[in-house]
Amino acid sequence: MNDPNKDPRFLHDPYLTYAAMRSACPVQAVPTGSGGHSSYLVTGYAEARQALGDPRLSKNTAAFFADKESRRRLHPAVAHNMLASDPPQHTRLRKLVTKAFTPGAVAELRPFIAKVVDRLLDQWPVDGPVDLVTGLAVPLPVIVICELLGVPEADRPNVQRWSGELFAAGKPGLIDAASNAMAEYMTGLIATKRLEPGGSLLDRLISARDGGDHLSEEELVSLAVLLLIAGHETTTNFLGNAALALLQHPAELDRLRSNPENVPAALDELLRFDSPVSTATFRYTTEAVTLGGTEIPAGVPVLVALGAANRDPERFPSPDQLNLDRDAVSHLAFGHGIHRCVGAPLAKAEADIALRAILTRFPGLRLAVPPDQLQWRHTRLLRGLAALPLLT
Ligand code: HEM
């Protein structure tokens, strides 16, 4: 099949294509990029879960690219990080992060998140059009991560800009410049915090130790950059996709509006229904692997389509229906296995607070354009709206 990411119909609704692929074969070879090499795409739930938990599928992308000319020249702090590593390195980094990234740290951020949401919604017109993406979904996650990391307010606009530019599909020059700027900035911030320690997550990471082990300077920089990259556009997409799903299902929306305390329980189904990370970051086979009956040779990339797995009727009956009463907790929107999202509680806290505030403050909210006119962002791994025009 041709690269579906270039097809506007696929970007608008990938689920029909995914369903057809899944019923043909839940693990199949697809062409990758311009080189014409094959990678394998996993669209079935059971196969996706198995792939995400299989140690023979490596995340050590530096090793994979080492002998390939196509290797991108990203700053090492952007290219080499926890998400791009295998045990034992991954285990060591993850342990130090989980020590600092506690549920308590997320709970402490809730009042701050609520304040930012209120401030952003205060700027929405009482009676008029507004874009939920630029008016909430883009700024909220980056402001929250900056607060978490202890990025001073004056520097946040720069960080927000670089973070956006890192996803500038098709503009390698801009991506490289943003990756350098971000890494340099974080290096400086860590140096400042060593001299004047504070109480932020970055401070906790600087002092996090596991026995005699602690994070090196380069590991700290790459972790700070990873948190920004991993926590920004993903959460932006979640807020947009969740709001759209609710607006397109008025009965579910009404029920939630009457019982906003049910928002936290609805988040898993919203994540399942239109998953913000459409495809997990790539893995490659370190040896031949048989997955879902398909033999995958050694040394090839494997892409796990989380969005497709979450619509597998074998796991979720009537998967194309948004059903807020469904037990969707086993969805794969945050991944599965050792790389499962570290930031999941934070993303859920942001969505809970933001969706509740929108439902309460704007009871008449509706789409300002027909759904088929909505523009989706052209990124390979992520699924999110370029804009979500609403009438308040
Ligand atoms: C709704 C929002 C989010 C979604 C859907 C999401 C999704 C994911 C997924 C699918 C993975 C695993 C990728 C793979 O295995 O290839 C992942 C990993 C990760 N996420 Fe998230 N994420 C979200 C928000 C966040 C936030 C807010 C943060 C932090 C501020 C964050 C930090 C991370 C980190 C550090 C990893 C790497 C974990 C590891 O390698 O062990 N994410 N995320």
Image: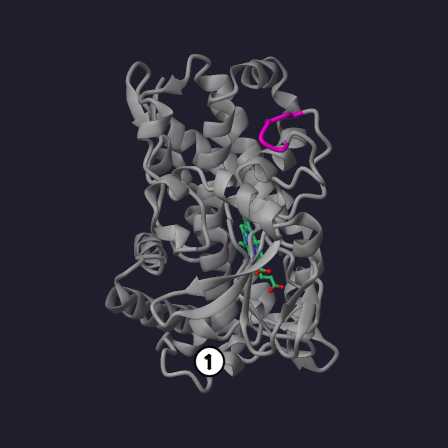
Picture layout, residue 83 above or below residue 2: below
Instruction: State yes or no: Cβ of the residue under disc 1 lies below 8 Å from any atom of ligand 1.
Output: no
Quickly name the residue at label 1.
Answer: 65
Magenta region: which residues? 319-324
- Rendered view: 124 above or below 290: above
Q: Quadrant of ligand 1?
A: bottom right
Judged from this view, the residue extending furthest toward the front is 24
Residue 322 belongs to the span the image colors magenta:
yes
The image position of residue 330, as x and y in percent, is 72, 43
Which residue is drawn at the image coordinates 28% and 60% (left, top)?
170
* Tag 1 secondary structure: helix
Left or right: 70, with 238 as reference point: left
**Residue 317 at least partly seen:** yes
> Quick one: 118 or 307, which is closer to the camera?
307
Q: Nearer the viewer, residue 179 or 331?
A: 331
Q: Main secondary structure of the magenta part?
A: loop
Q: Residue at x 31, y 52 (%)?
A: 157
Looking at the image, residue 117 lies above or below residue 368: below
Q: What x and y, as percent, mark residue 190?
A: 46, 71
**In this picture, residue 20 sits left or right of residue 327:** left
Question: Could you say where residue 40 lies in the image, as x and y percent from the top left?
Answer: 54, 63
What is the quadrant of the C terminus in the image? top left
Crowd band around label 1 with a 10 angstrom C-alpha radius: few (<14), some (14–19), many (20+): few
Q: Among all residues in the image, which is located at the extreme bottom?
A: 67
The answer to whether residue 198 shows anywhere in this view is no
Q: Quadrant of residue 86?
A: bottom right
Q: Residue at x 49, y 75 (%)?
A: 80
